[in-house]
Image: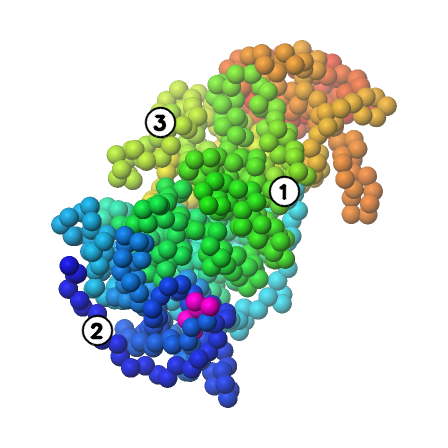
Amino acid sequence: MLAPASVPPPQPGPPVWPGSPQPLGARFRTGPDGVTGTNFALWAGGAEAVEVCLFDDDGTETRCPLTELTHEIWHGFLPGVSPGRRYGFRVHGRWDPWTGARWNPAKLLLDPYARAVDGEFGLPPEVYGHVRDWPQQHVADTVRDDRDSAPHVPKGVVVFDETPGDEWADDRRPKTPWADTVLYELHVRGFTMRHPGVPERLRGTYAGLAHPAAIEHLTALGVTAVELLPVHQFAHEDHLLRRGLRNYWGYNSIGYFAPHAGYAATGTRGEQVGEFKRMVRALHAAGIEVILDVVYNHTAEANELGPTLSLRGIDNRGYYRLQPDPRRYADYTGCGNTLHVVQPQVLRLITDSLRYWVTEMGVDGFRFDLAAALARSMHDVDMLSPFLAVIAQDPVLRRVKLVAEPWDIGSGGYQVGAFPPLWTEWNDRYRDTVRDFWRGRLHGVRDLGYRLSGSSDLYAWGGRRPYASVNFVTAHDGFTLRDLVSHQQKHNEANGEGNRDGTDDNRSWNCGAEGETGDPEITALRRRQLRNFLTTLLLSTGVPMLVAGDEMGRTQRGNNNGYCQDNPTGWLDWSLAADPGWRELRALTARLIALRRAHPVLRRRAFFSGRPQGPEGLRDLAWFTPAGREMTEQDWYAPAATLGMYLSGRDIPGRDERGGPVTDDSFLVLLHAHHEPLPFTLPGPPWARGYELLVDTSREDQAEPPGTRHRGGAELTLPARSVQLLRVRHDPAASG
């Protein structure tokens, strides 16, 4: 039985010329005899018919059959269809969910190649291909719903290939080397929603992020790249809308070529494309690269009970991985479906999208959400998979920054350290180790030594370098840094899921009280811990990643899964910037980033050898116990809360721009996680005659470096729970 049909009969449209099967999508161009119009092309394997549906401003729909079919691509040229015109597709074919066929022409489908989208997805019953309220729920997804979805879904928008005034002639990509990169993860909307220096009409938009007041914070901090949470067009999940919430993070993509319309200040009839480009140009002009967090592993259509918005209605079996029972979806993502990347048309969709964002939208790289799902061949994760092979040989994509989230939720999905040399990876082992060390739960310091020095145990193979490791302590999906030292448990009640969502493995320590407190000792300890985390991160070898607001004490009140908190919980509170204590934290962060930029020994392009070098036999990396002697194998496994790391600036591997040797100062980093002070004997000659103290995280005032000097071989008392950064001095006066 079918739901009552309510789809109006097709209205006659303008004549459709044959057009071209290339390129896919809707492209405005000049056709035969100089006539302008738009060429439409849609891959729809197995479909029986395809219609382009054009929409006037009043919602009137005109349907135009595409009668040309070339290699499973339906195509046609419509004269007179200009940029700004809204459109969608209706695709005809069999309805047989038992075999994976889910064609339903009653559902207006978003063009996978749409470059702009007008409107938002709500999820009323009409947008589902099946009858959602069918009384027999166990077979509901097998009963077709013939109600028209067009009034309830957004439309694609025809756009100019190049909008006048948005050319790239004056753009200069920063092209920051990986070793020199400092990432800053931010949310386009949340970063400026409460920024007092950004005009109210621009807050929460691409234009807002491009505003000088927003960029000034980034340049003053010294970060070299922003990693934007998803900006592809996305939809809100039904369960969130029912609770009066919205998807905030954006990991629910439905349009891989379209900048999310909700972040546009200038309009949604194609204007968002130019606004995004201008944002990229403004960031480039400030020396900041733009990296997009992209979600090619799944779409917003979810599992068999999800809505029919685009790919499901175009060719369900061609785009999605299905189980042996093709009515069901293979789910390696936890979001209901997984794109079938080994299929040529799916691989083409992804790579076409990536190239578009690089060549036409100006971005500098990508962070791939659940990248292990993309690297699966038929079932297992395969580092020779079609996706990774195509990226490796693509002349555009192999030159941009590629960051993997190296896991998914499927069997064998944890792949940290396994991606090939072009890739860098989020290193969650760095996160866990550093968190455990500073909360006093790390048994021995062996793992900490690896994490501080570039994680050679994970990445020293196949020509990979220390910058293969993206080091982070916090990310968007977890506690903020302030919450990490303020909450023992997550507090996600506002998400409406009974506090069941979000990880329970936070490795946090609240310093003695849960949540905010007026206790001055606890407050002081928490701020010291924040300084410890930031200092550890920015002195570690690898690529550091900060999360927007961590440098000034941003809090989500213990919510470690703010994916649906499009409100002050998820937005940056810029009033913190006026607080003296948080100003000092921001100043320390900026100073540490400046130290990285000034000293190549802190951003090495090759792994340490650990072997004696030069006439004095000094190692390029040496580890010391509090007694001032080099660590032995037994020391690495013994219980300890203190570690000394000596970084030699002599004979750093590599050459400068003129082919000369790279040398630098040498440094001693002392990390002490115990709750009591500890005497530490500073290594004497030949390691150093003396030391100059540059950073001491035990100090409240971090506006200026301490500058205190110590003799080599002297005993330095390490304050409880602190990091000391000392510059080595070899001049004779240093030993006086």
Q: Look at 44% across and 54% down and name the residue there.
A: 231
Give the percent coordinates (x, y) of residue 268. Answer: 39, 66
Inter-mark Cα distance, 2 to 3: 54 Å
Q: Do residues under tags 1 and 3 come within 8 Å of each other at their CB atoms?
A: no
Question: As displayed, is residue 548 above or below residue 159?
Answer: above
- Quadrant showing the C terminus: top right
Tell me, yes or no, if residue 567 can be seen here. Answer: no
Query: Which dot marks residue 421?
Result: 1
User: Label 3 amino acid?
Assistant: Gln
Q: Nearer the viewer, mark 1 or mark 3?
A: 1
User: Label 2 amino acid?
Assistant: Pro
Question: As displayed, is residue 399 above or below residue 504?
Answer: below
Q: Do residues under tags 2 and 1 come within 8 Å of each other at their CB atoms?
A: no
Residue annotated with mark 3: 489
Give the percent coordinates (x, y) of residue 668. Answer: 68, 24
Q: Which residues are magenta?
A: 71-75
User: Tag 1, which secondary structure?
Assistant: loop
Inter-mark Cα distance, 1 to 3: 38 Å
- 344 or 608: nearer the viewer: 344
Q: Which of disc 1 and disc 2 is earlier in sequence?
A: 2
Magenta run includes residue 72: yes
Magenta run includes residue 219: no
Figure quadrant of residue 271: bottom left
Tell me, yes or no, if residue 384 can be seen here. Answer: yes
Give the percent coordinates (x, y) of residue 88. Answer: 35, 68
Figure quadrant of residue 562: top left
Residue annotated with mark 2: 8
